[in-house]
Every structure is written in structure tokens, then in C-alpha cells.
Image: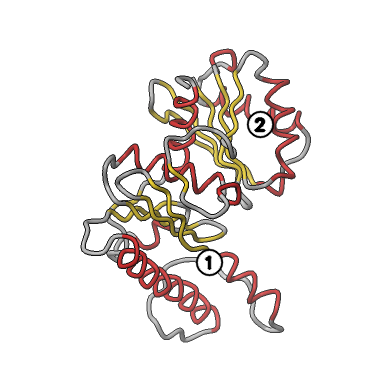
Amino acid sequence: MILCFDVGNTHILGGIFDNHRVIARFRYATHLLGTADQFGIFLINVLHANKLQPDNIEAIAVCSVVPSCDYTLRHSFSMYFKAANYFVLQPGVKTGLNIKCNNPNEVGADRIANAIGAVDAFPHKNIIIVDMGTATTVCAVTEKRDYLSGAILPGMRLGMEALKSNTAKLKEVDIEMPTSYIGRTTRESIQSGLYYGQLGALKELIHGSKQEAFPNQPVITIGTGGFSQLYKDKSLFDVILPDLVLQGIYKAYQFSLVQ
């Protein structure tokens, strides 16, 4: 079994793979990451809750965009999974992608993991990936596995926190699909602005990316990330793959074994 982790700014998303499929998944709030022992015990409890044994973990594969967490996580893994191989998706690791950016080292590991998962799910296809998490990212990958990068904009939670932090009267609201464009209360107005503002931005970015990178070519648009499900009925995505980043991390680890 392989333990895979996507260490993000809001959550640490974990997945347990057995025979190439996810058999369990879990989340841990990134800001609550304490000591190596605390996280290690949490993982042991997750395994036991799923009737799995820690000794069966063969490897741990990680992609992280939060450097401050890296030492604690690595220390935790070394103490509680001593026999497991350790793999980090980072610059210099062979991924099977051709990174066509001015500075490949700047590209977030989560974006690369998404691209690896996408080309594995849809080989020889032009792909646009929209990941809706703390930040919302739009990435383009060609049928030749060229990673072209794309766009980054604040996610809906960041937008809500910016309103809360920089205004006197606006407060935090639940992020959910609004019932109308015109909110009748301040709460409904914020929800409408967050939801439809993100929808409008993504429609423009997806359309512009298709025209710029894939003129007159078929393209598959993949949605992923926690907020993508809110747009499942908006014809924004061809498919939503919630586990895309975990699949990409797993594939990157498998790819490293044959280098």
C-alpha cells in the first residue's frame, strides 16, 4: 500500500492506494499540524479506522506547497513508518511531462501532480485543468504532454477572507451555491459575488486558454479541488475528478521506480 499526501495551504489531503486504486482518503487541517508525534498518531488511527496495518505501508509519496510543514511531516513518517520508502514530488524529479515554463522550479508541485494525473486519465488529449482550492488554478497540457502552465487567481475562501479582513461590516459566510444572482441580504450578496464571480472568471479563462493554446482543437476540461463540485451543473467542466492530485502523486511515485 502507498500513502499519498497533497500538502496544501488549507488542508493536507491524504489517500491510501492499494492495487492502483484509492481505498481510503482523509483530510487534516494544515494550520493544526503540531508535532511529528501528533500527526503520526493521527495517521495510525486513520489506518486502524480503515482496518489497515501500518506495517503494510510500502511507501509514502508527497507533494507540498507549504515548506514550513515539510520537516515535521518527514520526521513523522520516519518515526512511524520506518520501513516505507519516501518520495517527494519536487523540481528535478522525472514526471513524464515537458515543462514549458520560463522557470520550471516555480511551478507548484500540486499543479504538476494534477497534470500527471490528467495525462494518465486522458492520454494523447489536450487538457485544461481547473483546481479549485485555496487558490484557483487553470493549467493547460497538450496532447504531447507539454505542460504550459496557465493562470492563478484567489479561491472563493480567500475572497471571502479578504472581504472579512478588509471591511468593517462584512462577515464570514458559508460558501455554497446561491439561489439567485441578486442577494436579498448581505450574506446572500456575498455568496452570490463569490460564486458567480468565480464562475465568470473561469468561463473567460477556460475560453481564452482554449483559443490561445488549442485553436480549433478538441480539449477536455477537468475540474478538481474542493469547490469544483459546486459547479457540476454549470457546464464548466467535461468531467470532475476529485482525486486527481492524489492520482498524480501516485503515478509520479510509480514513474520514479522505473527511472
Q: Amino acid at mark 1?
A: Leu
Task: Indicate which disc residue 153 carries.
Answer: 1
Residue 148: x percent and y percent? Answer: 43, 54
Query: Residue at position x 47%, y 32% from top?
Result: 252
Q: Is 82 displayed left or right of 208 in the figure?
A: right
Q: Residue 151, relative to residue 224: is it above or below?
A: below
Q: Residue 241, relative to residue 174: is it above or below?
A: above
Residue 69: x percent and y percent? Answer: 72, 41
Q: Amino acid at mark 2?
A: Phe
Disc 2: which residue: 42
Residue 214: x percent and y percent? Answer: 29, 60
Query: Residue at position x 75%, y 35% from top?
Result: 71
Mark toward the start of the polypeptide (1 vs 2): 2
Quadrant for residue 201, please give it: bottom left
Residue 173: x percent and y percent? Answer: 57, 70
| Of the two numbered discs 1 and 2 in the rendering, the one whose residue sits closer to the viewer | 1
Q: Is 203 displayed left or right of 188 in the figure?
A: left
